[in-house]
Every structure is written in structure tokens, then in C-alpha cells.
Image (tube, rainbow, N blue to C red):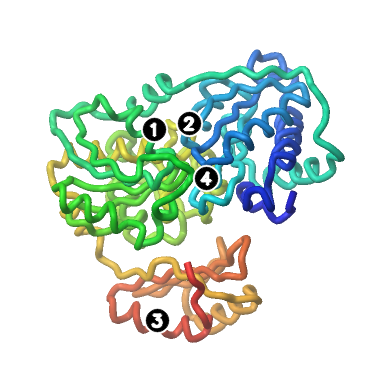
Amino acid sequence: MDSTIFKAYDIRGIYPEQLDEEGAWKIGNAAAQFLRSLLTGYERGQSNMQSLCVGRDMRSHSQDIAKALIKGMTATGANVIDIGMIDTPQMYFAINHLGTCGGVQVTASHNPAKYNGFKISGLQAKPVGADTGLKDIQHIATALPHTKGNGKGKVEKRDLTADYKNHVLKFLQPSKVKLKIAIDASNGMAGKMVPAIFSDLPVEIIPLNFTHDGTFKHEPNPLIEEYLQEVKDAVVENGCHFGLCFDGDADRLMMVDEQGQTVTCDLMTALMAPSFLEKHPKATIVYDLRSSWVVAEEIIKYGGTPRRERVGHVHMKKALRDSHAVFGGELSGHFYYRDNFCADSGLITLVHVLNISAKSGKPISELIAPLRRYSASGEINFEVEDKKTKMDELARRYSQGQIDYLDGVTISFKDWWFNCRPSNTEPFLRLNIEAKTPELLEERLGEIESQLGRRAAH
């Protein structure tokens, strides 16, 4: 088991070179030990609290990895509820619905087919990251001398599709408007879950890449613009109201409007915010600090309280809980909902976009147009070995601006701003710039690019 597979928010590596069945057994054993150790005396007496949920995605090796993971868990005496091949958000639902002490989803999300990994959640589906237990799990797993031992834990298989469907569709507002949408499942879990949940609704779906054969027609990463071309073409050719492209485990997505134009996720957050504030006046909405100025402006415009937060689902989910926020959006395509256990969900986001489209009766492009009032660079990666020194140099160069260090360095002026933050896992600095005009954006991007050096390939 390669120690580099333990990342900031999850576990991920190449199968079987970096992560194999032996590693899965040890991680399962360690995760079960750690999650059960957190239980209070009262919680230990609850029927399902000693149990863990396990699910998996559609990768060709996920089933074998899940089997080994489960054996490692039961060797500790933990009971396991195997909920089968699911999207990652269903894991968050299952933990809360069944009342377990946590769960593990076997997935490598948007990574290529040769990768696999684990997303670990604790009580109430709170994420387990490097600062909230993943380092402890790594320590336990790497200290295990072997993968032997037959504990008394039992395995129960459960199909939660019907309950999960009811949960997702409780967010759907009744409408007589029939919408046509294109969905690119990226040969990932949306290919199973979208038909299971939306097939009997008055929505015509143009399916793209819904099959599962262990390969991806394109990498299941909707943030890469070239991978959106297929859904863009389908939207235009079929006269769809909009299109969506999901990632591999269906917790993230990107949207394109009826003209086939990409709608960035910060504009989606700004688009969706008013519908939450209409139901929950003055509520808090969380957004990640890479987002456009327009997000906070729209939240304030509709009477809400904007909360700017660090990048990453661990930080976003904590912010939602801490501030009792009703909704949150991240530039990466994660959208979080208070009424979904403060967790993210691609399918619930689909429901909310259906609601907005049907209720407004307007094309998505018309709804988004007023929100395109600034020019943004999108996230650009630069190959930088000494990341701190470069960020310090930027802070000195632009010291006349308003500076904060919430996540990397953010420097704001009256007509432009930028954030530069370090990658947790690679020798990259990630840059986002926004300006009031395209000309100013180009000028400032050129300045900073000359200081940061070579762009990295995506």
C-alpha cells in the first residue's frame, strides 16, 4: 500500500500498483476501528450505530476492492450494510437514513479508469479528511502487520434505491411544463441513478455515455471544457432546455444552457440562490472564495447572508453546519444542501435546475445573462515548486490591495481581484482572476502569469 494514496480529503491511487485488495482490507479495518472509537456510550447502544455502510462505483475493480474493504471491517467485529453500486451522495443519505456510525464509498471520482479509492464519512455523513481522522486511519492501516482475522461482524445487503428516490424527489416542485434535457453521465454513476430516479417524470432525457464497461469515452471530469462538447452538441441538436455533465461518482456536475454555452458553477450558485432565499428569508448561503463577485451580490440582493469559505468539501460542509446555511456552491461543481444533511448531491442539483427552468419559463441563457457582468479567467494551474515564496512575492507586488489568507492569498481591488492557492497534492499554484472588463482581465493575467511562470497541463 503506497502511502501517497492518502490525500487531503480522500484516498486515491492506481490499481493495483498503489492500491490493491490487501490495502483495501487494511483501510477497511482501520476505518472501522477509527469510526467506532468515536461513539459515545449512548451511541454504542443504538442498533445500527456499530454498523458501517459500504458502497461502490462502476469501475471494473470496485467490486473486488469493496469485498476486501468489507472483510477488513468485519474482522474488527463491525457489522456492514452493503448498499451496492451507488452514486457517492447516496452514501451520505444511507448513513443518515440507516443511522450508522459512518460509511465508505469505493470510488476514484473523476480520475481515469485505472484509479480507485475511498471516500470516508463519519456520523451524520460528516467527511473524514486529513485533519478530521484520515491521518489516524492511515496510521492504523500502515501499522497492521497482516490481513488476517475473522471477526464476528456480519454483512447485510440492502437496496436503498426506492428510499433514495423519495429523498431526492422531495425537492421537486410540481409542474405541468415538460422539459427536455441532455445528460452526459461520463460512463459514471449518473448512468445508473438518473434512469432509476427520473424515468417516470415528465422530463425527456437525452442520455449520453450511460453505459458501464470499465472504460470512459472521456475522463469523467466535467470541469475540463473539451469534455463538455458532447453534451453541448446534444443540447443544440435536440432542442434541449439545458444539459448537464456529471463526474464519475455523480456528486459534481457542470451545466450548459440551451445554446450550448457553459454555465460556470459560481453562476449556477448565483442563479439558484434566490429560490432558497424565497423560502428561507435572510438565510446564509456559503460559496467558495474562487467564486465571482456576482455570487455575494446576488445573495445580498435577495436578502441573504453570504459566507465566503475555503475550497474543499470538508470546509464547505463544516461551514454549512456552523452557520446553519441553507445552501452552498463551489466552483468545482459541488452543491450543498442543508436539507440533504449539509452534503452535496448532483441529482438534487438537477432537481433544483428543473424547478428553476420550469417555474421561470425562460431560457437558461436569459436567466444567466445578467449574471455575466464580470470577466473571469477560470482556474489556471502553474507549475511551482516553492509555492509559499511565490505567494509571498504576489502579496508584496500587490500590497496596495485588500489582502486575506483564508485559502492561499486573495488580493482585491475596486475593479479586479485574484486568488492564488497551493495544491495539496501537486507542485502547483492555482490561480483565479476576475475583472470588470475583459481588457483588464487580460492585462492582469499577463502580469501575474509572467511572475508565476509555466502553466501546467490539465
Find numbered disc 4 in the image and state the secondary structure of the residue it sits on: helix
Find numbered disc 3 in the image and state the secondary structure of the residue it sits on: helix
In the rendered structure, the answer to whether residue 293 lies left or right of residue 19 reads left
Q: Toward which corner of the image does residue 230 lie, by quadrant?
A: bottom left
Q: What separation in Å lies between label 1 and label 3 (alpha carbons)?
A: 43 Å
> Mark 2 against mark 4, which lies toward the viewer?
2
Q: Toward which corner of the image does residue 137 lie, by quadrant?
A: top right
Tell me the crowding category of disc 1: few under 14, some 14 to 19, or many 20 or more residues within 10 angstroms, Cα based. many
| Sequence-first tag of 1 and 4 | 1
Residue 319 tag number: 4
Q: What separation in Å lies between label 1 and label 4 (alpha carbons)?
A: 28 Å
Q: Residue at x 74, y 34 (%)?
A: 34
Kindly identify which residue carries mark 1.
193
Q: Position of residue 390 (x, y in %)?
A: 60, 79
Name the kind of residue labelled 4 in the image. Answer: Ala
Tell whether label 1 touches label 2 (CB within 8 Å): yes
Kindly identify which residue carries mark 2.
90
Kindly identify which residue carries mark 3.
444
